Image (cartoon, rainbow, N blue to C red):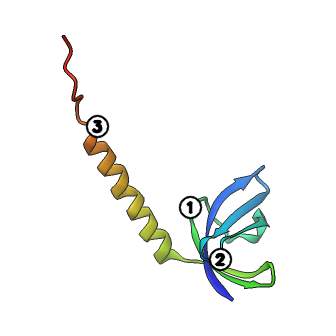
Amino acid sequence: METKGVLDRIVDDHFAVILAEEIRKEFVLRREELPQGSSPGDWFVLTIKGEKITNLSFDNVQTQKMEERIQRKVEKVREKKRGSKFKRK
């Protein structure tokens, strides 16, 4: 089965936690099993057999899409923080 997953975090600098939201599962891999240069927030196409990831490849399109989405949200929050609604006496 193929699905998408995001690198959620690196634990103790040795383990990578990948979340596959579509199938609502969490996978823990050794960090060495990730493609070189992977960092939290990166998306992957996962091939899963049973309860294990048998192959993963970097999904550049999904990663870029999510980075842009986060950037839009950050900009929206920053726009709202322009000055206080309350006046000082």
In front: label 1 or label 3: 3
Element assignment for label 1: loop
In front: label 1 or label 2: 2
Residue under the image location 33 percent in, 57 percent down: 72
Q: CA distance from mark 1 to mark 3?
A: 26 Å
Residue most toward the bottom? 1
Element assignment for label 3: loop
Tell me residue 59's x, y (percent): 54, 77
Residue under the image location 70 percent in, 55 percent down: 10
Residue under the image location 41 percent in, 58 percent down: 70
Identity, as a three-letter code, of the amino acid under mark 3: Lys
Give left or right: position of 51 versus 8: right
Residue that badge 2 annotates: 23
Give left or right: position of 61 versus 47: left
Residue that badge 1 annotates: 41
Q: Residues within 10 Å of mark 3 (few under 14, many from 20)?
A: few
